[in-house]
């Protein structure tokens, strides 16, 4: 008998896979896992098809094709005024997922602590565990104002740091709350890194989806933060192409060199034609600035619809998610409620408790569910119609 010792004994199927599988089984409208139910732009599909027909279709360079790394350098410089050397500081990865895993495996050593801000995207903690580190978790503060969600508390973040904290993982615009970074947050972060020597991992997968006229702020817009930061993003959300799995990371050369050592032995390189198509599209047609307006209309449509139900939407500042307060339905574990709504209404959602270390714990259950509004208007309207059958208890 093989004595198999799990490296991740507490990890099961992700909540996203679990809810999507159930949604398929129940033929439910899937507002759970975050993906659009529409196609990437025609011009992008055409650019990828052309690249595939023209070739090359063999291995791309390990660090990504030069045209795409160049386009990413231009994009980041335009957004944040930060110049990255496309040859040594930008790496194309298999989605943000692989960029995160490669970065954490490269940078976290056994015995290191890594600070996560709860609710935290599900990948971070297992990646830290695989690297031999220990996730330390500090919670976003829940606002005292009704339906206004979560707040960042930098004093609590600083208080949670230990002598062994090697890295802080940031994720703004934030999945699942939609919270975005303000200039004051970057000021606070600057103060913290001036007092504590550590690295930053900034997961900016939703960088192009920020609402109400505000703009996305990255730690890399500040010199002292950029020096120690790995910026990670994904073209999945930006181009409605989550299935293509192309992302990137930008970091100072010394840090990028270490990340590439892991990247080259996990995927080696990323789909050549998709890289070439994205590079062409970024240089010619892409209008990234239009994405926020596109999603703001969807957010507002869903909020208006939800206001006709017993669920109370919380304000979302960015991403394509919003949270709903389910208190009208009585006090339940969020997962129980998500399963009930799936079965009774045929709408899949994500319990926010899944973004905490222990989803069953009272501190993880705020009676909130996450809804994805990256859906056609008709899908959102049908979901709302179904949710109208929920009755307050
Ligand atoms: N980080 C966050 C916060 C996410 O929500 C996701 C999922 N979209 C990812 C990383 C993974 O991105 P990708 O699909 O590009 O691997
Ligand atoms: N990031 C997506 C979400 O939050 C899920 C991606 C995945 O399933 N790995 O819904």
Image (cartoon, grey):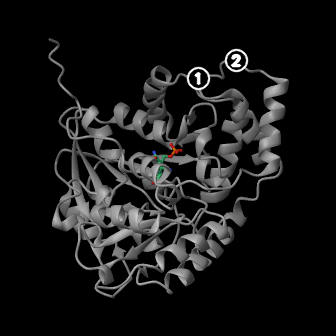
Q: Gap between marks 1 and 2, in whole Å?
A: 12 Å
Q: Is 116 or 383 nearer to us in this picture?
A: 383
Please, what secondary structure does the residue beneath circle 1 have?
Answer: loop
Q: Nearer the viewer, residue 139 or 41?
A: 41
Q: Which residue is mark 1?
A: 62
**Residue at image coords 74%, 34%:** 276
The verdict on label 1 being within 8 Å of ligand 1 is no
- Residue 212: image quadrant is bottom right
The residue at 29%/73% (across/down) is 367
| Nearer mark to the viewer, of 1 and 2 | 2
353 in relation to 241, above or below: below
State the image coordinates of residue 227 (x, y, percent, origin top left): 45, 47
Which quadrant is home to the C terminus?
bottom left
Near mark 1 (Cα within 10 A), the count class, few <14, some 14-19 or many ≥20, is: some
Residue 7: image x %, image y %?
22, 29
Q: CB under 8 Å between callouts 1 and 2?
A: no
Image position of 184 (left or right of 384): left
Residue 77 seen in the figure: yes
State the residue position of label 2. 58
Indicate whether 262 appears above or below 24: above
């Amino acid at each position: 008998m093989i004595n198999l010792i799990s490296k991740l004994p507490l990890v099961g199927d992700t909540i996203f896979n679990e809810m999507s599988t159930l949604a398929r089984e129940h033929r439910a409208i899937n507002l759970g896992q975050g993906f659009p139910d529409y196609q990437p732009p025609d011009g992008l599909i055409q650019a990828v098809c052309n690249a595939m027909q023209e070739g090359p279709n063999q291995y791309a360079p390990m660090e990504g094709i030069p045209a795409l790394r160049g386009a990413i350098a231009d994009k980041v410089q335009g957004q944040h005024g930060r110049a990255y050397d496309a040859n040594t500081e930008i790496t194309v990865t298999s989605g943000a997922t692989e960029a995160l895993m490669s970065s954490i495996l490269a940078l976290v050593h056994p015995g290191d602590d890594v600070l996560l801000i709860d609710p935290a995207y599900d990948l971070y903690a297992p990646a830290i565990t695989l690297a031999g580190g220990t996730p330390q978790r500090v919670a976003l503060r829940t606002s005292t104002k009704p339906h206004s969600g979560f707040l960042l508390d930098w004093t609590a973040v600083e208080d949670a740091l230990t002598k062994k904290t090697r890295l802080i993982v940031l994720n703004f615009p934030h999945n699942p709350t939609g919270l975005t970074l303000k200039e004051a947050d970057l000021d606070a972060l600057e103060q913290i890194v001036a007092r504590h020597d550590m690295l930053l991992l900034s997961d900016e997968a939703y960088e192009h989806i920020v609402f109400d006229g505000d703009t996305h702020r990255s730690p890399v817009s500040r010199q002292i933060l950029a020096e120690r930061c790995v910026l990670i993003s994904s073209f999945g959300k930006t181009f409605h192409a989550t299935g293509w799995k192309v992302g990137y990371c930008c970091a100072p050369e010394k840090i990028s060199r270490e990340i590439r050592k892991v990247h080259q032995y996990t995927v080696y390189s990323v789909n050549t034609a998709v890289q070439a198509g994205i590079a062409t599209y970024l240089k010619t047609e892409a209008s990234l600035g239009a994405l926020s307006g596109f999603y703001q209309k969807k957010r507002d449509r869903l909020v208006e619809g939800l206001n006709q139900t017993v669920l109370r939407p919380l304000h979302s500042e960015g991403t394509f998610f919003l949270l709903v307060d389910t208190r009208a339905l009585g006090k339940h574990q969020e997962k129980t409620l998500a399963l009930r709504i799936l079965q009774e209404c045929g709408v899949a959602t994500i319990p926010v408790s899944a973004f905490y270390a222990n989803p069953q714990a009272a501190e993880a259950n705020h009676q909130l569910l996450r809804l994805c509004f990256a859906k056609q208007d008709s899908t959102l309207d049908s979901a709302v119609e179904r949710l109208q059958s929920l009755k307050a208890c």
